Amino acid sequence: MSRYLPLVGIIASTVAGLLWVRAMAGAVPSGQTQTIQSSAKDSARGRTLPSVRHDTPFAGGIAVKLRGDAAMLMLDPLGRRTGTDAITGKAFAEIPGGSGGEDSVDDPTDTSRSPVNIRAKELAVTPALAGAYKLTVSAAVSGKYGLDIGGFSREFEMRDATFEDVPILGGTRHSYLVHLESGSRGGVVVSGGFYSGAAPGNTRPLLTYASPSVPETRVPAGTTAFPIVVFYDAHAVREGFAARLDERDISRIFHPASGRFEKVLIPAHPGRNTLVLTVRGDDGRKVTDRLTVVVPK
């Protein structure tokens, strides 16, 4: 809980600021191959994708802390943006009640072999709308990042999701879908912001991805491994799961589990690398995703 105290502070200070402004206005508006498995605390908590966009008020807020040399950009249910894109350098401040800033520690007087150098950014939205927010993490250089995503009710009750040591390549983006629940307790449900397989009717995709965030990803020359960040829906089953990279079976490096996510580094070579994932649902559905990573020759 302690790591979320700064996030609570962001929400609280933002709310206080809003109340002051409204009071002054005199009115309140209405309205190589390596697998990194997720730990128990990395439960995907029953992933869902959003329904249609709407503007029903959500009596609470959302707060995100990003650790590492990366940037984040949030898109709200109405298509408004707040945050920064590390690749283009563009910044946006379109979401009402959105705020953000640096929470970094860098001690220039520290001459030890391991000087203090903590890079972190925070972003909060309050009040927030119930519905789906898209969170994009981007990096200009390769590295790793961590995310703390919290949803707060009006009484600051919190439900959260945490992601640690997520590898990202320079010049690429990762995409998360953060669904804010409208119940009195608040909370967030997180899934990948991209899915490739068909999801007919009202059925949910069995696999969603934070990485890749598009069907075909172009990466820097010399890249030898690409990070897959995959979320398994609560209705996905392990039996029958298969993963093939350029027609080679690599299923053993994946560890599918219903309602969970994992990070997997797949090998990459110059040219086109095609990953095909097949999964079944507990309702008998079979879904096949095809993802391509292009490394310049």
Image (cartoon, rainbow, N blue to C red):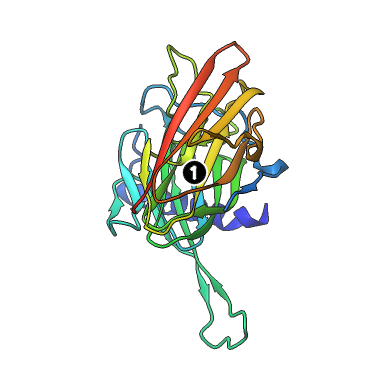
Query: Which quadrant would the C terminus be assigned to in this image?
Result: bottom left
Front residue of this view, candidates 187 and 162: 162
Residue denoted by label 1: 62
Q: Position of residue 240 (x, y in %)?
A: 63, 21
Spot occupied by residue 170 in the image (x, y as percentages of width and height): 40, 58
How many numbered circles are shown?
Answer: 1
Residue at 58% from the left image edge and 26% from the top image edge: 233
Q: What kind of residue is marked 1?
A: Ile
| Whether residue 199 is situated above or below residue 144 in the rendered picture | above
Residue 99: % across, % down: 39, 53
Q: Is residue 182 at all visible to an observer of this figure?
A: no
Q: Is residue 176 above or below residue 118?
A: above
Q: Residue furthest right?
A: 40
Q: Secondary structure at mark 1?
A: strand
Residue 218 in the image: state x and y as whole percent. Answer: 35, 48
> Which residue is nearer to you in this view: 10 or 265?
265
In the figure, 281 relative to 126: above or below? above
Query: Please, is residue 285 above or below residue 58 in the view?
Result: above
Q: Quadrant of residue 2?
A: bottom right
The answer to whether 273 appears left or right of 248 in the picture is left
Q: Residues within 10 Å of mark 1 (few under 14, many from 20)?
A: many
Relative placement, left or right, of 24 versus 164 is left
Q: Is residue 247 in sight in this rendering?
A: yes
Q: Nearer the viewer, residue 26 or 212?
A: 212
